[in-house]
Image (cartoon, rainbow, N blue to C red):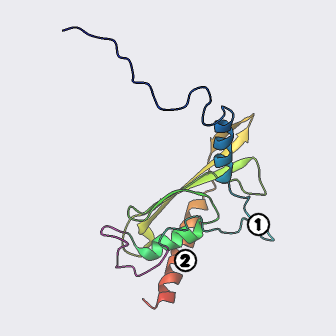
Amino acid sequence: MTLRPFHPAPSAAPTGRALLPRTALPALLAASLLAGCGSAPQHDKSGLAVPQNRLLKEDRGANGGSTPLESNGVNAFLWRGALDTLSFMPFASADAVAGVILTDWYTPPATKDERFKITCFILSRSLRSDAVRVSVFRQAYEDGQWVDTPVAANTVSDITARILTRARQLRTDSGQH
């Protein structure tokens, strides 16, 4: 058996001139990246960011605590309560079936040298305080780099309480008790 070198067939593409100039591709990529950028968040009178619905295609409806969002869903009131409570932060990921919300880093407008990230787990179909687990991460900007620092002792319990309060409000508004 004799091996022959591979010679591709001549293409029908025009020779000499490319379809796009070489500088057009980087410009096209830069334009598409900039188109995905959003505007800066709006702030209220106290300087806090106004909540925004960044999950426009996410089902935020609360159809009952005993009815799962899908086959293995979580409590709909807790899910929506968590989304509403954490909506001032940018979401990195939200999975309604698994009950996981991950935020991206958020820097409060009043303090530019610290940032926060929150992870929230909805653990049950029941509307109970032990069905929500919140973790808060804080970093401070020191000597030109972000350094992990502890959060205030009551931060996690305050956020959990706000999620539960919002979930109970949603359940009351829906007519279920």
Mark 2 against mark 1, which lies toward the viewer? 1
Q: Position of residue 168 (x, y in %)?
A: 50, 81
Residue 6 figure quarter: top left
Locate residue 158, reporting x and y percent.
59, 67
Q: CA distance from mark 2 to mark 1?
A: 21 Å
Residue 54, placed above or below residue 166: above
Q: Earlier in the sequence, mark 2 or mark 1?
A: 1
Q: Amino acid at mark 1?
A: His
Q: Which mark is residue 43?
A: 1
Residue found at the very far right of the displayed protein: 45
Q: Residues within 10 Å of mark 1 (few under 14, many from 20)?
A: few
Whole-percent x, y for residue 170 in the image: 51, 82
Amino acid found under the numbered disc labelled 2? Arg
18 drawn magenta: no
The residue segment tinted magenta is 60-73
Q: Residue at x 75, y 46 (%)?
A: 113
